[in-house]
Image (cartoon, rainbow, N blue to C red):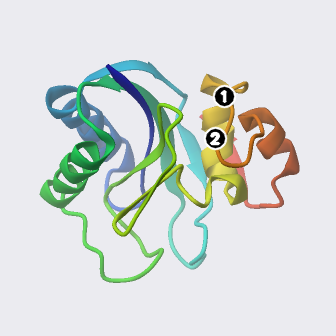
Amino acid sequence: MNKAYLLTGGNERNKFKYLQKAKTSIINECGEILSQSALYETEAWGKTDQPSFLNQVLLIETVMNASTLMQVLLRIENEMGRKRTEKNGPRTIDIDILFFNSAIINETDLIIPHPQIQNRKFVLEPMNELAPDFLHPVLNKTIHDLLMMCEDKLDVKKL
C-alpha cells in the first residue's frame, strides 16, 4: 500500500461542500483517508484579487501508483466542475499530490514532491498539523523546518 499526502482546496461557490464532496470521491475512488488536517481559510496565492480559499491536507492509503492516482484526482476535479482557464485563478476544487511515500518523481505531467511546497504557507500549515517531522525527500528538511523558513506572508487561519 502507498501513502500519499493530498492538498484539497477551493474558493468558488460553497467551498465547504466542495471539500466534503472531494473527500467522498477520494474515499470511493482512491483509498482510505488515514488522517486529515483541520480546515484552513487562506488568502489567495499568486493571483490575489479573488476570494479566500478553504484548504485541507489528507493522508490517504492507496493501492494506486502515483501516476494513476493523479489521473483519478484530475478526473474528480473535472467531474466537480474544475475549469482551468486562468493560472492560479478561482476554482471549485483543486486536489494536489504533495507527497507520495518518499518518492521523487519528475515526469512531464507529474512532479512529486509538489515543487512549491516550501513556498506556500497554506500547504505547510495543515501539513505541519499532520506530519511536522515528515522529511521532504528533495530538500531534506522536515515540514516543521520548512514552515519556520517559509517567507510566504499570506494569512492562513485554522478554522
Query: Is residue 24 placed above or below 155 in the rendered structure?
Result: above
Residue denoted by label 2: 137
* Residue 134, disc: 1
Which residue in the rendered view is the most extreme toward the bottom?
86
Q: Secondary structure at mark 1?
A: loop
**Which amino acid does the dot numbered 1 rest on?**
Phe
Q: CA distance from mark 1 to mark 2?
A: 9 Å
Q: Is residue 121 above or below residue 141?
A: below
Q: Are marks 1 and 2 in contact (CB under 8 Å)?
A: no
Does 135 sit above or below residue 115? above
Across and down, in percent, residue 102 comes to 53, 34
Place residue 16 in its image quadrant.
top left
Residue 73, numbered circle:
none
Between 159 and 93, the residue placed more toward the observer is 93
In which quadrant of the rendered image does the N terminus lie? top left
Residues 110 and 31: in front is 110
Left or right: residue 93 compared with residue 38: left
- Residue in the foreground of this view, choosing between 112 and 156: 112
Q: Which is closer to the viewer, label 1 or label 2? A: 2
Q: Quadrant of the C terminus?
A: top right
